[in-house]
Image: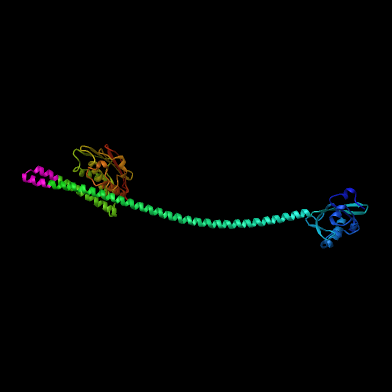
Amino acid sequence: MDLNPICDQASIGILVIDQKGEIERVNQFVEKLFGYTKDELVGQNIEILIPQAVRSRHAGHMKSYFGSPLARPMGLGLDLFATRKDGVEIPVEISLSFFEEGERRTVAAFVNDISIRKKAETDLRESEEKLQQMNSRLEQRVSERTAELADALLELQETNSILETQIALTAKAEEEARNALSKEQELSELKSRFVSMASHEFRTPLTSILSSASLISKYIEAGNADRSEKHLGRIKSSVRNLTGILNDFLSLEKLRSGKIQVLAEPCFLQGICEEVVEEMQAILKEGQKIEFTPQGPDAESWVDPHAFRNVITNLLSNASKYSREGDLIEFQTWREGGEFGVKITDHGIGIPANEQSRLFDRFFRAKNAQNIAGTGLGLHLVSHYLNLMGGEISFSSVENEGTTFSLKIPINKPS
């Protein structure tokens, strides 16, 4: 018996099967799908459409289903195949539904050919596999290129490191060459200053000594003792100047070679200052006066007395040398905490502002002091002595108004 016209025209295969598994009815789509005619299928066992490999299991599945029939898809999670008349197996989807007529049960199987979908799935899987393979190859290539790039980068870094080292060495060599040239130029300048200073500072007192000695002999013959005494004083003063110059040179050489060391010992600095002021009276210019104002009583201090005396003598000597006749020199001292403070102020020629940064250089003479006797070593020696004693020196100066030097020297007993 044929199915009704609607089922017969359906675009899905419909088979009706009895409890024995025999095919009772099929629609036209089944004929088209499997290549059989209705007459060839009706009365045949359903296993005619089942692949040979699974027929032995099908009878048990069918018996089980007729025992408890239920409308459901068949073979959930499995790939199902059916066999065409020409023996070709095709992938299918099957849904089951049952009918009861009294005690008789039949099953309607709805069969759909999913070859196209399976092919699409297979093509998709193959495409995914190919894509995965391509991705894998791409990742491998990226990994290889990354490794090559890392090697190239490492090589570049090594090259950069070598270049940086070479550049640094070249820069260092250039810096050393510049320093050597600068030192050579500085040494040449110092030699030139020294020759100029020595020529002037030694020639002037020697000329004075020679002329005074000649005049003394004449005054002695003429019986003029007063004039002889005056020139003897000039000789003594010139000898003192020469002695001071030689002492500066000797002190500079000893400091340069490290032969001078300061040794702190108990002493009274205010008393040393008073002695230096007394000694300075013999070399002060006409009308000059040192006004010494110590603050507080004298007390024991731990300082190198010889280095301290040299510093004070040099500063007071400069204050007199670069001041005019009749000028006042102010000399103050004080104790504060563990330091001894000194301030020496003159009202002399001062130091030009553009030359103050070089004040403590060797052989430096300011332009406004070129005609005043001096070696240009005094303040250089002062700064070295103070450095050895752990002291500090600072100054302020205005050209044609005067200069003030301030000192701080530690006085506590060394540990």
Residues 222 and 195: in front is 195
Q: Is residue 129 magenta?
A: no
Query: Residue 339: image x %, image y %?
Result: 32, 45
Residues 403 and 399: in front is 399
In this rendering, the count of numbered labels is 0
Residues 206 and 50: in front is 50
Compared across the picture, whether 94 is left or right of 201 comes to right
Q: Residue at x 22, y 50 (%)?
A: 246
Residue 340: image quadrant is top left
Query: Residue 37: image x %, image y %?
Result: 89, 56
What colouring does the structure picture have? Answer: rainbow
Query: Residue 56: image x %, image y %?
Result: 84, 63
Compared across the picture, whether 112 is left or right of 357 comes to right
Outermost residue on the right side: it is: 102
Indicate whether 269 appears above or below 138: above
Residues drawn in magenta? 213-233
